[in-house]
Image: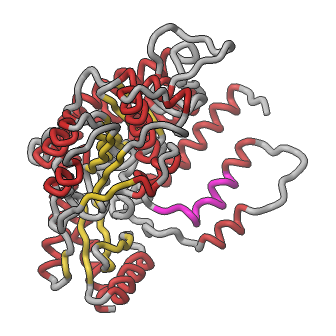
Amino acid sequence: MAQTSSELRDLFRRAADHAADFRESLDERPVRSAKSSAEVRADFQRPLGAAGRPAAEVIDELVSVADGGLVATAGPRYFGFVVGGALPAATAAELLAAGWDQNAWNSVLSPTAAAAEQAAGDWLKELLRLPPTASAGFVTGAQAANTVGLAAARNHVFALAGWDVEADGLIGAPRVRILAGDERHATIDRSLRLLGFGSSSLELVQTNANGVIDLQDLRARLDGHEGPLIVCLQAGNVNTGASDSVGPACRIVHEYGGWVHVDGAFGLWAATSPELRDQVHGLELADSWGCDGHKWLNLPYDSGFVFSAHPEAHVAALAYSASYLVKSGEREPGDYAIESSRRARGLAVWAGLQELGRDGVTEVIDRCCRLARRFAQQLGEAGCEIGNEVVLNQVLVAFGCDDETDRVIAAVQEGGVCWMGGTTWRGRRYMRISVSNHLTTEPDVDRSVQAILAARTG
């Protein structure tokens, strides 16, 4: 419905004020939602009226029904699912992106959206120490990044074998061997399903106690191999935070003409820190990389990145044309991502990186790792079992038997001081603590530790 200039300004200010009110409440509000999922669904479900309603009234009602189901994931004591809280500048840029309503498929549709992605992509490659000639695609998250990276890999290894997979598909194609560690993330399997390989095509390589791929087992499995080959490595195990030995593994795989894809959803950010980058030494030798922005970079959700050392394979796997689509003649953002009509997600990336700067990115990464070690030290000294070598921002904690660990996790979540999830690692249940938020401080850790210990004895 049409709005007057005054009504539109009042509406946008109203929405921004509601969002700011929520952000200001993060430090004190319970981290968990105040209502159950069923209660929140009941609040939202109602008959859709025949007549429209004033926009301001709709927004106020949305805030009212939503509040009880909001989780303080953006706050300093949310330690679940390796997610950060969106930076102020990135959040404000997201508001502008919605207001400007730009389609980021190419520079004809929006020169601004395309330019923001190109500039931010160059900054990201510099921060992550990736080849400056690599392509950069702005996708929705690590799942899309892994899918696009493996699509580029599929194109490349089939082209070397003389097979046009984009035209002829997989029926009758040469067999591709695909290997990954037995502690890879589940998105790798899903990407293989989506790309037509099937999850059963995956050959699993042994990993050590912290989830790092066994290089001797990798080499033994490749001994005598000929033909198309893709190997998936991991930077940042979702449970332990450990990364595969990327450089040595790349050298082994490249001996056999294979493509290495690195799933670096959050662990890739170790490359930005002088203290941590040895964990991903040799990262630049890989052929493609996937990474999240809405995790450790603390950008709004629906922000991920995929890079390829072989831009031509990246474009060949994804680009398309139609008679009605006007192009500039240059490589465009839409050539590197799956979606066509999509919002200008690069604006929030550009703004967030500008807000932090190179030193700020490093400081966030290093501080989160120090705080993870603080969690492990305090909980270990209190008699809790730490189940991993804490090398990044992930901590696994057990409280005796599996049932007792699950009980403590549930009690902590219900208490609302902080929120941690559970996981199964090497056949045992653990509390999984993921320190990823730019707002988290030592007092937040100490307060959370006290809540955990109280739940253990409660």
* 327 or 244, nearer to the observer: 244
Residue 95, x across and y down, in percent: 52, 36
In magenta segment, residue 63: yes
Residue 393, x across and y down, in percent: 23, 58
Point out the stretch of residues depicted in magenta: 60-71
Q: Tell whether 195 sits left or right of 229.
A: right
- Residue ID at (15%, 78%): 380
Image quarter of the C terminus: bottom left
Q: Is residue 292 visible?
A: yes
Farthest-out residue, right: 50
Residue 322, x across and y down, in percent: 65, 17
Q: Is residue 168 above or below residue 398?
A: above
Q: Is residue 363 visible?
A: no
Main secondary structure of the magenta stretch? helix
Q: Is residue 19 above or below residue 161?
A: below
Q: Quadrant of residue 362?
A: top left
- Residue ID at (41%, 79%): 415
Q: Is residue 110 above or below residue 364?
A: above
Image quarter of the N terminus: top right
In magenta segment, residue 184: no
Residue 284, x across and y down, in percent: 20, 33
- Residue ID at (18%, 64%): 208
Q: Tell whether 399 sits left or right of 30.
A: left
* 165 or 296, nearer to the observer: 165
* 221 or 26, nearer to the observer: 221
Image colouring: secondary structure
Farthest-out residue, top: 329
Q: Quadrant of residue 300?
A: top left
Q: Tell whether 325 sits left or right of 358.
A: right
Q: Is residue 22 above or below residue 169?
A: below
- Residue ID at (35%, 46%): 177
